[in-house]
Image (cartoon, rainbow, N blue to C red):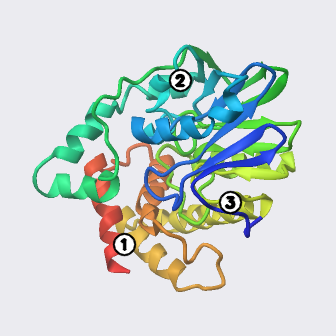
Amino acid sequence: MSGSNYSLGLHEVGEGCFAYLQPDGGWGYSNAGLVVGDEASLLVDTLFDLKLTAAMLNSMKQATETAPISTVVNTHANGDHCYGNQLVEGANIVASSATAREMTEVPPSMLAALNKAPGEVGDLFRSFFGDFEFDGIDLSLPTQTFDKRLDLNVGGREVQLIEVGPAHTAGDTIAYVPSTGSVFTGDILFIGGAPIVWAGPLQNWIAACDLIIGLEATVVVPGHGPLTDNVGVREVRDYLSYVLNEATERQAQGMDAFDAAKEICKNMMGDTSKSFAGWKEFGRISVNVDTVYRTLDPQHQSPNVVEQFARMAALEKQH
């Protein structure tokens, strides 16, 4: 699977089942999915802005011409998986209840303002999200919510929605298509880049990886990065287990969370025996370690989002 074609556009991963991939899978460049049934289709996630989403929908026209998209599933609340919802007019938008609540917390207007901010704050956010256009987005919120599990039938195709959050965000969902053995994981999987644990706990995310492995899917479509299989899932699980163990040990010693992240990062990148030693976006470990600290100690004060991004940028400049 590691040799699969990782190029921009629509890739068939099973009969009537497609992945839309956006290299290089870094910040904001997410993947999506399409399941085509009889006279109706289901879209797994939209993209970060209207231009990207329109290009994706245009690439799907041949597949959806006789089977229009009637259902959109948002795997979680991050904008690169839902900001394009308004372009799928008339669709039923499905998400977990926790995702629906969280989607209102970071409106597109907030990212538009941060991208336009003067000085260091603007420079910081443009270094992460300067490729994207957040003006003109009117976020379409879910029209149907669920908790834990929802089985959908779209044009005769079964799609199983399984809530595995809180992990990456408050309400992560994976979408499994039994007929093709395909699973769309949202941001429970970043392949080739470090995951980022905004919500946690890490134990939930590790359990989600185990659940995906148990599906024995033929094709695993990550939220970011190339197509993978259970080998890729295990690598993400191994990374999370490593960070959890290392951060827990340092929290018990009373070490500052950011100091712990810097030390763990240095040790990790120096250990070439670990498959994740060379992953991109390795600075995300500062958020991940902080989440472990917050999980272990509810009194732990996490830095604000600007500081979180500043710490990630600082870590990556140091290495």
Question: Disc 1 to disc 2, how far (Cα)?
Answer: 37 Å
Residue 101 % position (x, y): 47, 23
Quadrant in the picture for the N terminus: bottom right
Marks 1 and 3 in Cβ contact (< 8 Å)? no
Q: Which residue is mark 1?
A: 316
Q: Residue at x 69, y 63 (%)?
A: 5
* Label at residue 225: none
Q: For residue 193, what is the image quadrant? A: bottom right
Q: For residue 14, what is the image quadrant? A: top right
Relative to residue 293, is residue 101 depicted above or below?
above
Relative to residue 14, is residue 34 depicted above or below?
above
* Label at residue 237: 3
Q: Nearer the viewer, residue 282 or 271?
A: 282
Q: Is residue 179 left or right of residue 60?
A: right
Quadrant in the picture for the C terminus: bottom left
Label 1 SS: helix
Label 2 SS: loop
Q: Nearer the viewer, residue 66 or 170?
A: 66
Q: Which residue is mark 2?
A: 88
Q: Is residue 256 visible in the rendered structure shown here?
A: no
Which amino acid, by three-letter code, is at mark 1?
A: Glu
Q: Residue at x 51, y 80 (%)?
A: 269
Which amino acid, by three-letter code, is at mark 3?
A: Arg
Label 3 SS: helix
Q: For residue 107, what is the image quadrant? A: top left
Residue 275 % position (x, y): 65, 75
